[in-house]
Image: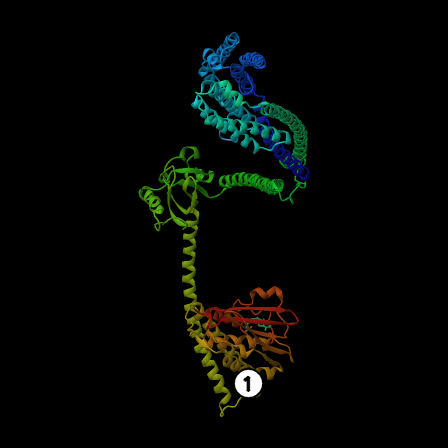
Amino acid sequence: MLTMLLLGCSIVSLTVYNLSNSKEIESTWANFEEVHSEKGRAINALRSEIGYGGMIHSFKNYVLRRDLSSFESVKYRLGGAKSVIARYRSLELNEKEKQSLDDIEDNLQSYADALLVAESMNNKFAVEVDRLVKVDDTLALLGMSVLLTESETGDNFVRQGTVKKSKSQTISMLRHAMGFGGMIHNFKNAILRADINALSLAKKDLHNGLQLTEEYLTFQLTDVERSAIRNIQNVLSIYSSRIEKISTFDLRSVSPEYIDRFARVDDEPALDGLRLLDKEIVAQSERAEEKITNLLDVINKADLFILYITVLTTLIFIVWSYWLLRLQIIKPVTRLTGSMTKIARNDLDIEIYGVNKTDEIGEMARAVEVFKKNVYLLESAKKDLQSVNYNLESRVLARTRELKNSEESLRSILETAVDAIITIDNAGVIRSFNRAAENMFGYNSANITGKNVNVLMPSLIKEKHNEYISAYIEPGEAELIGVAREMEACRQSGEKFPIHVSISEVNTSDGIFFTAIIRDVSELKTYQKSLQKSKDIADEANKAKSEFVANMSHELRTPLNAILGFAQLLECDPDEPLSSSQKESVDEIRTAGKHLIGIISQILELNKIEAGKLPVLMEQVSPVLLVQESLSLIEQMCEECNIELVDNADYDGFPDLFTDKVRFKQVLINLLSNAVKYNELGGQVILSTELFDKSLRFYVADTGKGIPSCVQSQIFSPFERLGQENGDIEGTGIGLSITKKIVELLKGEIGFTSEEGKGSCFWFELPLFDSLE
Ligand code: ADP
């Protein structure tokens, strides 16, 4: 960059330098051109040849003086002027210029002719000679002015008038003012022709000439130029004084020769001055040329240098650009393209080059990084999707397999099902009809499928069936669906038979279907009828039995009471006291009688329960008092048998029960008395409780012999004493069966556990009052 900057600065300074040089060259070249302009030089040369010190000057002097030197000078100058014109003609000229040159040449020819005339006129006075050799200069003067104008309107003098005149222009104008048609011409004509106007014109021209010399002095001049101008001024001053002097003369009264003698001026200093100035201008032009050459050389060198620098800069720029392009753009872009290609090939285990850069490459790299992440996400999403897809496919396959299996098994179930299975659509059209249905209704599946299901129904139901189906589709109108029903069906043979139907609804994409599972309940109905008949007979028998038991108990109790009464009379008759053996016999009678009455009472109670005649009063009951009363009733029995009564009941946690007070005590006392009765001497009876969510359980455990497991199942059967029939312990075998029935009447449960030799634990459980809704 620094190199580029330096190179840039160099080019700019060189260009500025060249520009300033160009300006200098331009101005120098303008001067040079002026001097070296062919036309300009030709006009100058023509003025020199025909003007002051030239042809007209010498011609007028020859007319006045008739001297050989003037004659020779005129001839010489005419030759010079002609050669200048010839040179002028070789330049590129327009018509006006050509015409002017023709006019000037004609004029010169006139002067040449006049010179010959003047030469032939020896011994004649100047006035006479002048009159004869008078030449009309008008066209030549006009031609001179046209030549000057045309050369000035050309490219070479475009700045004329707008810019200060140059030295050569000033000199040219000075020659014009002093020469042909100017000061010397008019001055000589004034002398020759005693023409006051010409004298005043000469005076004017002189004044112009002096002014031009003053203008020339304003240029930067060499000493030689300055002295030449001084000489010219001196000569012009002399002319001025001569004109002043001549003005005082009566020109018509004196001869031109006289005046000429008096008015003679040495023109050599002025002519030398003009020559010197010409030389000096030429020398200056040469110097300018040299300067231009030098400047052009410098410019050429500078241009060459600029060219070198430009080439070098271009080369450096190209190399730098290439380096920049390669290092900063192509290389990173190639690497990023490579990365992209790898990413596109799913090679994501790459590091993206230039992610940390802050330029456009960095932005591209970050974009590629994002692309890579997206591809990574896409790939992992693809993998996930593939695995999900794979899972799904395998699940679909498995499911299809399952479905196929299940369809097959369903079909085989359907086909092998004992029940008839029929599927109908919501128009009641049969869609499937399994083998059991074929067997049941006598139709072939292929024939019945597609027909309305009402063909399977007796005509009464048939009419209503379609209404059922359409009514079902209306919400809230389902009468058949989900409810198992019994109805009558009709076989192909026309035979009607009872069926048990359960209909379910299947809502599929193809619409609503109904599946009916139908069982032929003809046999069941027959069995039910016979069962009902048996039950009716059994109920009758039971009723008869209850009546018989009640009657029999009543019939037994009356004589038993009489027996017991007479036995008591026998014991208590003081008139006929009994012997001790009689007394023993009477005691036996009384004990057996009491036992018999007990049995009869229990049979009556059991009979009452079975007949549903046992009164039960269900109410909110606090069991604490009832339990304690029951325990105190049993206490004496415990003492007699030397049994320890342990009360572990959790009274604090006792909630109220919903039960019958009397029956509760009856149940508990029965279990407690059994626990004492079937205990060992010195054994224990333990009461405990357990509270459940909705019930309270009472445990009555003993340490007796226990119940053999082989007879445990019969324990709640009436009159089963489980081997105690012949034992010492009194009993009827009805107590537990009554207890169980009472517990069931109280909405409770009863049960027991027992281990032979270790004891038994009976329990009953009754509902809590709070559990009732
Ligand atoms: P009973 O006690 O009048 O024989 P139960 O119906 O009360 O009639 O009992 C039926 C039988 O169950 C009893 O004869 C007895 O063999 C057996 N049993 C009842 N409770 C117990 C018990 N706690 N321990 C052992 N055996 C019992």
Residue 386 picture location, percent across and down: 59, 39
Quarter holding ligand 1: bottom right
Residue 346 visible from this viewpoint: no
Residues 472 and 662: in front is 472
Residues 531 and 498: in front is 498
| Residue density around tag 1, few if under 14, some if 14–19, many if 20 or more, within 10 Å | few
Against 502, residue 345 (above or below) is above
Kindly identify the amino acid type of the residue bearing the numbered disc 1.
Gln
Residues 446 and 714: in front is 446
Res 265 → quadrant: top right
Residues 90 and 199: in front is 199
How are the residues colored?
rainbow
Residue 257 picture location, percent across and down: 51, 18
Res 610 → quadrant: bottom left
Is disc 1 placed on a helix, strand or loop? helix
Residue 518 picture location, percent across and down: 43, 45
Residue 497 visible from this viewpoint: yes
Against 208, residue 739 (above or below) is below
* Residue drawn at (41%, 55%) of the image: 532
Q: Split into 4 quadrants, where in the image is the C terminus? A: bottom left
Residue 192 picture location, percent across and down: 47, 18
Against 43, residue 393 (above or below) is below
